């Protein structure tokens, strides 16, 4: 039910246009058991991205430290479809795109929601099923300082989590999305449109998940559901997500991954440019102690055909793997 409280505390950050085109991107090799670490000034030859201390190579580059091959200059291509094709890496999928491509797809996403102002649960029933109705969370579990990244106009906190588990409690809720202002203005059925949310102290943050807005070890619980395909750089987003959760804190996570490049999803990629392969998610999720993991997806994913994904709940480990 929509809150009737007076306007609550809002933390409105200016839309964080975090241009990653010239960001120092380091990396980890595709082998999860690689002993090569990055960070502390090591940049994987300038041809990869440092993702939780391991090197993942940019398109065109390969090798344990991304020293083989040559990174492709995808940003210079004028055609959006050509850029989306160029950014696909055979080992890792499309894990990042240039800022121009991301802004073009973000604008298309904004236009989509302006035209679709009807109430939407954003596949909430499917997500509830994928998480087994969040049965891994104990009765009345307290989620403390809680955040949802990439909340969209309706939030999975509202449509999935608290709808199926109204017994859960919070100290505060932070909702973050780069399009948050537009959703409040143009999505009349958004549950946070009037600046209130679930009768709980809430912070609204208009920023992309790549932006270094939140400090390390900030949140007790972070939820991120079906967000990666919308971002500019999945490596930076996942690294930020891992960093902002307190040691022992809770991750509630879902996303999809692809096996190989296919032209079948090019039209959808013009809204959702990121298409990562499973190895990227594996490196991220191994940093958490598993409480719940569903690698079989949902019935809806099977019906749509060719989709793979994971529903995951876990606690952040004290040491990085």
Image (cartoon, rainbow, N blue to C red):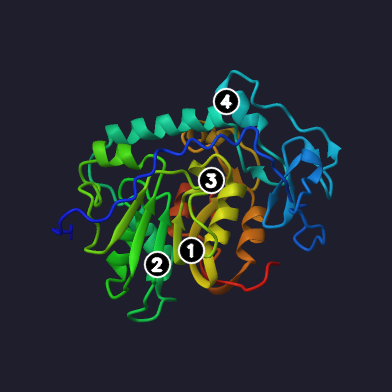
First in residue order: circle 1 vs circle 4: 4
Q: Nearer the viewer, residue 126 or 271?
A: 271
Q: If the image is split into quadrants, where does the C terminus sit?
A: bottom right
Residue contact at pointers 4 and 3, CB within 8 angstroms: no
Of pointers 4 and 3, the one earlier in the residue sequence: 4
Q: Are marks 1 and 2 in contact (CB under 8 Å)?
A: yes
Q: Residue 238 at what x, y percent from top left?
A: 57, 54
The residue carrying pointer 1 sits among few (fewer than 14), some (14 to 19) or many (20 or more) residues within 10 Å by Cα, namely some
Mark 4 → mark 3, Cα distance in angstroms = 23 Å
- SS class of the residue under badge 3? loop
Q: Gap in Å between the C-alphas at discs 3 and 2?
A: 20 Å
| Alpha carbons under labels 1 and 2: distance apart | 8 Å
Q: CA distance from mark 1 to mark 4?
A: 38 Å
Residue at the spot of label 3: 210
**Residue receiving disc 4:** 81
Q: State the residue position of label 1.
A: 218
Q: Which residue is mark 2?
A: 145
| Earlier residue among tags 3 and 2 | 2
Q: Nearer the viewer, residue 222 or 202?
A: 202
Q: Position of residue 52 (x, y in %)?
A: 67, 57
Residue farthest along the left direction in this orientation: 4
Visible in this render: residue 270?
A: no
N-terminal of the pair, mark 3 or mark 1, is: 3
Q: Which element is circle 2 on?
A: strand
Does 227 sit left or right of 111 as displayed? right
Inspect this view and state whether residue 124 appears. yes
């Amino acid at each position: 039910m929509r809150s009737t409280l007076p306007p609550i505390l809002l933390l409105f950050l200016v839309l964080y246009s975090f241009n990653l085109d010239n960001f120092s991107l380091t990396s980890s090799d595709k082998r999860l058991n690689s002993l090569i670490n990055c960070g502390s000034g090591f940049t994987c030859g300038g041809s990869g991205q440092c993702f939780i201390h391991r090197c993942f190579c940019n398109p065109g580059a390969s090798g344990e430290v991304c020293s083989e091959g040559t990174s492709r200059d995808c940003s210079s291509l004028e055609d959006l479809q050509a850029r989306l094709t160029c950014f696909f890496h055979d080992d890792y999928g499309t894990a990042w795109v240039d800022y121009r491509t991301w802004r073009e797809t973000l604008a298309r996403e904004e236009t989509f929601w302006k035209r679709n102002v009807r109430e939407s649960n954003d596949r909430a029933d499917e997500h509830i099923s994928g998480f087994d109705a969040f049965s891994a969370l104990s009765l009345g579990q307290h989620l403390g300082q809680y955040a949802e990244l990439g909340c969209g106009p309706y939030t999975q906190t509202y449509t999935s989590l608290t709808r199926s588990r109204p017994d859960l409690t919070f100290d505060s809720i932070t909702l973050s999305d780069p399009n948050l202002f537009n959703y409040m203005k143009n999505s009349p059925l958004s549950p946070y449109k009037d600046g209130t949310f679930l009768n709980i102290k809430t912070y609204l943050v208009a920023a992309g998940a790549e932006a270094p807005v939140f400090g390390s070890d900030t949140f007790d619980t972070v939820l991120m559901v079906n967000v990666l395909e919308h971002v500019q750089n999945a490596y930076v987003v996942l690294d930020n997500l891992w960093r902002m959760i307190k040691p022992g804190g809770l991750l509630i996570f879902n996303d999809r991954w692809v096996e190989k490049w296919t032209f079948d999803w090019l039209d959808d990629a013009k809204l959702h440019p990121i298409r990562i392969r499973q190895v990227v998610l594996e490196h991220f999720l191994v940093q958490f102690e598993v409480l719940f993991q569903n690698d079989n997806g949902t019935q809806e994913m099977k019906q749509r055909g060719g989709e793979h994904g994971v529903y995951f709940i876990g606690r952040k480990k004290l040491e990085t793997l």
